[in-house]
Amino acid sequence: MEFSTSLIATFDPAKKIVVLTGAGISAESGVPTFRGEEGLWKQYRAEELATPHAFEANPKLVWEWYDWRRGIIGKAQPNPGHLAIAEMERLFPDFALITQNVDGLHRRAGNSKVIEIHGNLWDLRCVADGRVREDNRVPLPQIPPLCECGALLRPHVVWFGESLDQEDLTQAYRLIEECDLLLVVGTSAVVQPVASFPLMAKEGGAFVIEVNMDPTPLSPRVDASFQGKAGEILPALLEKLQGYWGKGGNS
Ligand code: BV8
C-alpha cells in the first residue's frame, strides 16, 4: 500500500486530527459487522433487535443477542488496526476518536480520548432509574438481567429510533466541524446522524481519508480512499507517519 508524501504531510501534528470508526475496525478481531453476512444472528438482522420496540416486546430475545455478542467480544483482542489508532493518539497532540462501535475494543487497545457515540455493551442501565453500571460477566448469570430495584436492566447503548447522548453529540459535532483531518475507518456510512459527519468535516475544510474493504457512498466524496483491511492499511500508514513525523516532518 503506497501513501504519497503529500498525504503523509497532511497528518501535521500541529493540526486537529479526528478518527471516526465503525464495525469494520473490529472485523479482524472476529467481531461480526452489522451489515456483513456474518451480521446475522439466528434469523434476525441487527436492525430488528437493536430497537426499543424489540426490547419491549421481548427483552429475553434481545438480551440473548447481546449476551452472544458479549461472549464473542469478551474473547476478542484489539487487532493491529485498533493498535495503530491507539499509537496515533500518542503521536498527535490534538487527536480525538469517535466510534460507533459498542465493543470497547478501542479503549482496550489503549485509546483514552474516545467518544463511544452509540454507547458500550459492557454497561447496563436500569430502565426505571437510569443508573448505569459496568458488568463484564460472560455469560450473564440471568437473562434478562434485573436491577436491585427489581426493574429490567438494558444495554447502555443507543438503539435505532433513540436519540444519541446530547453531550457526546455536541462534543462530536465540535470535533468534526473544527478538525483539519478526518480519518474514516470501517463504516458503511448509512447510520445517521454519524453518517453525515464526514461530509460535515469536508464542508468545514477538513482533508477526509477513508479506509474500507469496499467502496461506500462516501468513497467518491472524500480526498483519499484506501480499499482494503484496516488491520493492514492502518499499521502501514502509521509506519510512514512515524518515519516522517517522528523526525520532525522533514525526512
Ligand atoms: C437518531 C448501537 C434521532 C446498538 C447502533 C426511523 C425511525 C427512527 C430513526 C430513523 C428512522 N429511519 C432512519 C432513522 C435514523 C436511524 C438510521 O440512521 N437508520 C439507518 C438504518 C437508515 N438512526 C437512528 O435511529 C439514530 N438515532 O436518529 O435519533 C431520532 C430519534 C427518534 C426518531 C427519529 C430520529 C440512532 C442510530 C444508532 C443505532 N445504534 N449501534 C448496538 O450496536 O447494539 S448503530 C450500528 O450501526 C452500530 O453502532 C454500527 O457501528 C453502526 C453503523 O454501522 P457500521 O459501523 O458502518 O457497520 P456496517 O456493518 O454497516 O459496515 C461495516 C463496514 O466496514 C462496511 O463498509 C465494510 O465494508 C467495512 N469493513 C468490513 N471489514 C473491514 C471493513 N473495513 C476495513 N477493514 C475491514 N477488515
Image (spheres, grey):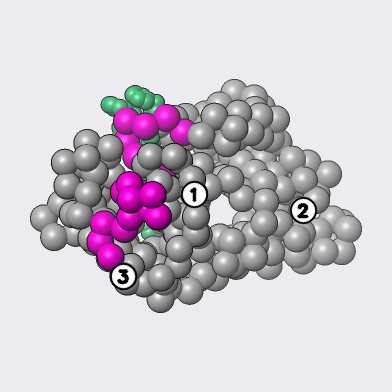
Tell whether position 151 is magenta.
yes
Name the amino acid, label 2: Phe
Tell me: is circle 1 under 8 Å from ligand 1: no
Three-letter amino acid code at disc 1? Val
**Residue reaching furthest left?**
43
For marks 3 and 2, the one nearer the N-term is 2
Q: Main secondary structure of the magenta part?
A: loop
In space, the residues marked 1 and 3 are separated at their CA atoms by 18 Å
User: Looking at the image, is mark 1 or mark 2 nearer the viewer?
Assistant: 1
Q: Is residue 198 magenta?
A: no
Tell me: residue 177, above or below residue 99.
Answer: above
Q: Find residue 141 and name its label.
A: 3
Q: Say which element carries label 3.
A: loop
Q: Which mark is residue 132?
A: 1
Nearer to us in this view, 157 or 107: 157
Q: Is residue 94 visible to us here?
A: yes
Label 1 SS? strand
Which of discs 3 and 2 lies nearer the camera? The answer is 3
The residue to which callout 2 is attached is 92
Callout 3 amino acid: Pro
